Image (cartoon, helix red, strand yellow):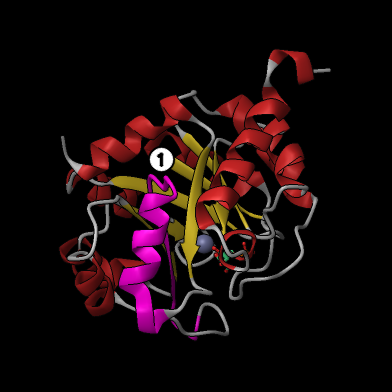
């Protein structure tokens, strides 16, 4: 099975906790990845920033390609970059298994989303806190992942913005269950509860994993908390 197919299948095991590779020890990335694997991570969320679409720079395809040798975990790439179509081939060649682009960077993304799917990868669309769901309605049918930003993109360690919750609820009602509904920014044991209740199935988490000494324990705590938030006994 391809890694993209494995990533697609993770929705069956939701909640999916996706560690964000941003605030990590880049000098020891192999070790970080090993700790995540041993801790039970099933996917890695790669935050790609270009210093233009967002006011921060992270890494690009050459670096991702080198990480591809470290692990077989699916790579969920979050492209916070301008003109992602121009670089699509590089990110495909680097071994990304899903590619999520921002609607603010690509106002008419149908073709790009189709190209991503045609390459056998999962196609995703992301929207910033200030962007209404209406902006992506017409392209939902081309998406395998919809990512709701719960902070302004660019930096880890920010506070969760509750505006994301209404958008998650609206999107969950519009999307078939097999589409991963992802929430990204400020996710921790407290904020994951309402995000799960609002219908998110994939939870991107940076600080709440990497600022703790035991990544496995942090992953399990997040997953257990999200699961109990939506278990029948917890439903209102
Ligand atoms: C923000 C990134 C997030 C971020 C999450 O632009 O897309 O993935 O790193 O980090 P925390 O969990 O610290 O908000
Ligand atoms: Zn992200």
Q: 116 or 204, which lies in front?
A: 204
Residue 66 at what x, y percent from top left? 20, 74
Residue at 67%, 54% in the rendered image: 187
Number of numbered discs overlaid on the protein picture = 1
Indicate yes or no whether the magenta region holds residue 62.
no
Considering depth in this image, is 41 or 158 the residue closer to the camera?
41
Q: Position of residue 32 (x, y in %)?
A: 40, 68
What residue is drawn where x is 15% and y is 64%?
Answer: 93
Residue 109 visible to an observer of this rendering: no
Instruction: Kindly identify the residue that appears in the image at 43 percent across and 30 percent down.
Output: 11
Ligand 1 - quadrant of the structure image: bottom right
Circle 1 — which element?
loop
Residue 59 percent coordinates (x, y): 37, 79
Q: Position of residue 175 (x, y in %)?
A: 53, 28
Q: In which quadrant of the rendered image does the C terminus lie? A: top right
Q: Quadrant of the N terminus?
A: top left
For label 1, being within 8 Å of ligand 2 is answered no
Please report the residue visible at 78 percent of the width from the left and 51 percent of the height from the top: 163
Is 33 located above or below residue 162 in the figure? below
Rendered view: 217 above or below 140: below
Q: Which residues are magenta?
A: 26-52
In the rendered view, would you say 214 is above or below 228? below
User: Taking 165 as reference, is 14 left or right?
Assistant: left
In-front residue for pair 200/218: 218
Left or right, 145 with respect to 161, comes to left
Would you name the residue on which mark 1 appears? Answer: 143
Query: Mark 1 packing: few (<14 Cα in 10 Å), some, or many (20+)?
Result: many
**The quadrant where residue 159 appears:** bottom right
Q: Quadrant of residue 209?
A: bottom right
């Amino acid at each position: 099975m391809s890694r993209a197919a494995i990533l697609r299948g993770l929705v069956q095991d939701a909640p999916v906790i996706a560690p964000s590779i941003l605030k990590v020890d880049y000098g020891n990335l192999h070790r970080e990845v090993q700790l995540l694997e041993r801790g039970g991570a099933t996917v890695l969320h790669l935050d790609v920033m270009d210093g233009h679409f967002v006011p921060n720079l992270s890494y690009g395809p050459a670096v991702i390609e080198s990480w591809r040798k470290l692990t077989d975990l699916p790579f969920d790439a979050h492209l916070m970059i301008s003109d992602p179509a121009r670089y699509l081939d590089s990110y495909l060649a680097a071994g990304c298994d899903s590619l999520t682009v921002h609607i603010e960077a690509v106002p008419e993304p149908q073709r790009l989303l189709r190209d991503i799917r045609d390459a056998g990868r999962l196609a995703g669309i992301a929207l910033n806190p200030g962007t209404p769901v209406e902006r992506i309605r017409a392209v939902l049918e081309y998406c395998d992942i919809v990512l709701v930003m719960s902070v302004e993109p660019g930096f880890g360690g920010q506070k969760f913005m509750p505006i994301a919750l209404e958008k998650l609820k609206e999107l969950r009602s519009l999307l078939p269950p097999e589409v991963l509904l992802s929430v990204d920014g400020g996710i921790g044991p407290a904020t994951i509860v309402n995000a799960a209740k609002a219908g998110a199935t994939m939870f991107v988490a940076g600080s709440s994993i990497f600022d703790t000494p035991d990544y496995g324990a942090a992953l399990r705590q997040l997953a257990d908390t999200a699961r109990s938030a939506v278990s029948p006994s917890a439903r209102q």
